[in-house]
Image: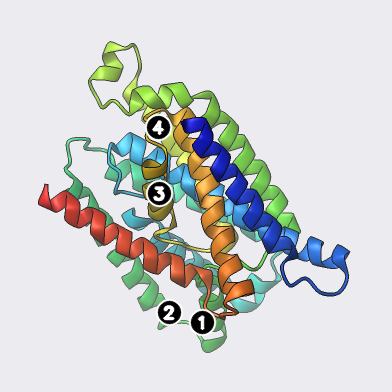
C-alpha cells in the first residue's frame, strides 16, 4: 500500500515538473529549459528543506502543530536582515557578493535559531499553548524591533529591506542554488542516517532512555540540523510561515506511518508537488500575478486554525 502511494507521489512530481519545464515554452529550448530549470531546482530545494525541518521539529516537540516558523523564526530573520541593512547601509549591502551575503545570513540565522529553539524547548513539560504563546510573544517582540528600526532608516534602505523581506520563489541564483544544494544534501544525509533514532526520539522523554538513547543529545543534534535547513531556505528565498505546516499535515494523511524512513521522503515529495504544482497553476494555467507565497500562507494559515481548534476541542 505504501509503495503504491509513493509511486503516485513520484509520478505526480515528475508530471508537474515536466509541465513546469515545457508548458507554453516559446523560443529557444536551451534557454527556456535552463531558465525554468533553475526555478524548478529552487522550488524543489526549498520544498525539501522546509518539509524536512518541519517533520523533525514536530518529532522533537512531540506535536504536529508546531513548526519553526510558527515559533518566531521568520520574525527573527526579518530582525537580522533589518539590523544588517541598518548597520551597513543600502549601498554597501547591495555591493556585497550574493554568496558572501548568503553565508553571512546563514551563519547568523543558524546561531540565532539554535538559541531560540533551545529556549523554547528548555522545559519539555510545557504544554502546547505555552509554547505557542512563547513563540508568538517572541515573534511580536522581534517584529516590534523591526518596526522601530524601520522608522530610523532612510527611504532607500527601507526599499531594499522591503524587497528582501518577502518570499520570492521565482528568483534563482545559480551560485546560491549550488551552495544551498550542498548544505541541504549534507544535512539530508545526516538526517537519513539517523532516521531510526528519530523513531525512538518520537516516543517521548521516558521510553528512549529505557531503550538506551539520550533524548537531550538527540534533540540537540536534530535542532542543529533543523537550524541549518530552515536557515538555508529562509536565506535563499525569504520567510514562508505556513508552508511546512501545510506539507506536514498532508504527509501525515497520505502516509499512515510513524517511521521516518517513510515520512521524510513523502514530505519531500509532497513539498515539491505543492510548490511546483502551485507555481505551475498560478503562472502557466491561470496566468495570475499573485505570488505563490501569498497562496501558500493563506492555505497554511487555514490549516493551522483548523488544527489548533481541533486540538482545543479534544
Above or below, 147 against 62 in this view is below
Q: Which residue is mark 4?
A: 220
Quick check: 242 left or right of 230?
A: left
Q: CA distance from mark 2 to mark 3?
A: 37 Å
- Quarter occupied by residue 202: top left
Q: Tell which circle, 3 or 4, labels the residue nearer the N-terminal end.
A: 4
- Pick whichever, 10 or 117, lies toward us: 10
- Quarter occupied by residue 102: bottom right
Q: Are marks 1 and 2 in contact (CB under 8 Å)?
A: yes
Residue 99 visible somewhere in the drawing: no
Q: Which residue is mark 3?
A: 250
Callout 2 environment at 10 Å: few (<14), some (14 to 19), or many (20+)? some
Residue at x-position 29% and y-position 49%: 65
Q: Which residue is mark 2?
A: 150
Q: CA distance from mark 4 to mark 2?
A: 34 Å
Q: CA distance from mark 4 to mark 1?
A: 37 Å
Which mark is in front, 2 or 3? 3
Callout 1 environment at 10 Å: few (<14), some (14 to 19), or many (20+)? some
Q: Which residue is mark 1?
A: 158
Amino acid at each position: 500500500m505504501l509503495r503504491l502511494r509513493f509511486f503516485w507521489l513520484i509520478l505526480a512530481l515528475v508530471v508537474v515538473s515536466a509541465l513546469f519545464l515545457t508548458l507554453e515554452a516559446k523560443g529557444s529550448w536551451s534557454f527556456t529549459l535552463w531558465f525554468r530549470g533553475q526555478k524548478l531546482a529552487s522550488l524543489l530545494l526549498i520544498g525539501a528543506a522546509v518539509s524536512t525541518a518541519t517533520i523533525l521539529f514536530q518529532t522533537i516537540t512531540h506535536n504536529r502543530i508546531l513548526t519553526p516558523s510558527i515559533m518566531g523564526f521568520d520574525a527573527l530573520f526579518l530582525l537580522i536582515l533589518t539590523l544588517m541593512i541598518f548597520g551597513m547601509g543600502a549601498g554597501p549591502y547591495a555591493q556585497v557578493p550574493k554568496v558572501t551575503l548568503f553565508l553571512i545570513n546563514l551563519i547568523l540565522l543558524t546561531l540565532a535559531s539554535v538559541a531560540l529553539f533551545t529556549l523554547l524547548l528548555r522545559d519539555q513539560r510545557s504544554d502546547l499553548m505555552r509554547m505557542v504563546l512563547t513563540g508568538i510573544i517572541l515573534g511580536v517582540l522581534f517584529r516590534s524591533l523591526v518596526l522601530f528600526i524601520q522608522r530610523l532608516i532612510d527611504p532607500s534602505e527601507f526599499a531594499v529591506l522591503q524587497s528582501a523581506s518577502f518570499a520570492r520563489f521565482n528568483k534563482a541564483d545559480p551560485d546560491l542554488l549550488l551552495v544551498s544544494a550542498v548544505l541541504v544534501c549534507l544535512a539530508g544525509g545526516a538526517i537519513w542516517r539517523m532516521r531510526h533514532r528519530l523513531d525512538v526520539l518520537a516516543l517521548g522523554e521516558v521510553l528512549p532512555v529505557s531503550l538506551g538513547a539520550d533524548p537531550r543529545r538527540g534533540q540537540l543534534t536534530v535542532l542543529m540540523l533543523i537550524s541549518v535547513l530552515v536557515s538555508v531556505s529562509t536565506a535563499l528565498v525569504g520567510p514562508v510561515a505556513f508552508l511546512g505546516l501545510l506539507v506536514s499535515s498532508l504527509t501525515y494523511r497520505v502516509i499512515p506511518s510513524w517511521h521516518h524512513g517513510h515520512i521524510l521522503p513523502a514530505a519531500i515529495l509532497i513539498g515539491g508537488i505543492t510548490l511546483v504544482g502551485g507555481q505551475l497553476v498560478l503562472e502557466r494555467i491561470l496566468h495570475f500575478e499573485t505570488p505563490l507565497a501569498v497562496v501558500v500562507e493563506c492555505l497554511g494559515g487555514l490549516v493551522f486554525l483548523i488544527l489548533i481548534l481541533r486540538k482545543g476541542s479534544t
